[in-house]
Amino acid sequence: MWAGHNREYALLNEERCADLIESIKAQGRQEMPAIVRRVRGEPDYDFEVICGARRHWSISWLRSHNYPDFRFLVDIRELSDEEAFRIADIENRAREDLSDLERARDYLRALDAYYEGRQKVMAERINVTESWLSRYLDLARLPVELMVAFPNPQDLRIKHVTAIKPLLKPDDRRQRVFAEAAALSARSGGEGAPVAVPDIVRALALAADPPKRSGSPKKSGMAQVVSSETGKAVLRIEGTDRKGIRLTLLNRGGASREDAEKAIREVLDAHWA
C-alpha cells in the first residue's frame, strides 16, 4: 500500500469487504482496476496501490480461500504524491465504507504534506468548501486523551465534532472531559453492551459542565426555584409555615415529568416531618 493511502489497511476484514468479495465471486473477476504506480528502490515491490486497498485485500482473501485463479487488476499511472492524494480522495469520497475518521486523518496528513498547512489552498485543490474541510480536520485533531473514551473510534462522525469540540475550552472544562474520558475507557473494558457514541458524547458534555444539584434551590425574591440537572426550572417554593409548604409546579419551564417527580421527592425528603 502507498504510505499516503486514505484507508487503514489493517482495519480491513471479511466483514468490511463482504460486499466486494461477493461481487467479485458473482462476476468471476475484479471489474474495476485499482490505481497503482511503479516504485523504485524497493527490492520486494514493483508497484504501490494508490486506490484499491479493499480490492487488494479481497483478491488476496479470495486467493487464499479456494479461489487461486483470481488476479488483482491494476491501472498503472505516473503520479506525484499530491496527484495520488487527490485521485484517491475523489474515488473514495462518496464511499460509505470509508469512515469519517480515516478520511479526516488523511486530510490532516495531506494538509502539511502537500499544501504547507494552507487550508484554503487545499480546499480549492480538492474542490470542497473550507468549512467542510475544517470539520474533518477538527475530527482528526481531537486529542488522544479524549479519543480513549470511544471503544471504536471509527464510529465517530463529523456530526459529533460540533458537540465535542466546544467541550475542550477553557482548560478547566478540558481537564474534566479528559478525566471522564479516562473513566469511560476504564469502564468499557468490562462486560456489557457497547456504549453508543451519542451516549459517550453526552457523558463528556455532562462532565464538562457538572449540573447544580436539583435539591439546591435558587432564590427568586422570597421564593426558591428548584431546577433540574439540566438547569430547567421545575418547582417554585413560595413559602413554608406552620401549615406546610406552598409549591408552584412550573410545568412550562422545559423540564420533563421525570424531572418534576425527582424534584418533588427531594422536597419531600427535605421537609417531610
Image (spheres, rainbow, N blue to C red):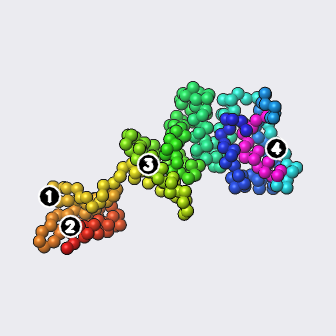
Q: Quadrant of the C terminus?
A: bottom left
Element at label 1: loop
Return the residue found at the far left: 242
Which of marks 4 and 3 precedes in the sequence? 4
Disc assigned to residue 179:
3
Which of marks 2 and 3 precedes in the sequence? 3
Disc assigned to residue 99:
none
Give residue 95's position: percent from left, percent from top.
65, 46
* Residue designated by label 1: 222
Observer able to see residue 49: yes
Q: Nearer the viewer, mark 3 or mark 2?
A: 3
In the picture, residue 126 is in which quadrant? Answer: top right
Q: Are marks 3 and 1 in contact (CB under 8 Å)?
A: no
**Where is 124 relative to 186, above or below?**
above
Disc assigned to residue 247:
2
What's under tag 4, amino acid-wise?
Answer: Phe
Distance between the alpha carbons at the discs numbered 1 and 2: 13 Å
What's under tag 3, amino acid-wise?
Answer: Ala
Which of marks 4 and 2 precedes in the sequence? 4
What's under tag 2, amino acid-wise?
Answer: Leu
Distance between the alpha carbons at the discs numbered 3 and 1: 39 Å
Give residue 154's position: percent from left, percent from top.
59, 49
In the picture, residue 263 is in which quadrant? Answer: bottom left
Q: Main secondary structure of the magenta part?
A: helix
Give residue 200's position: percent from left, percent from top.
48, 54
**Part of the protein shown in magenta:** 47-64
Q: Nearer the viewer, mark 3 or mark 1?
A: 3
In the picture, residue 4 is in which quadrant? Answer: top right
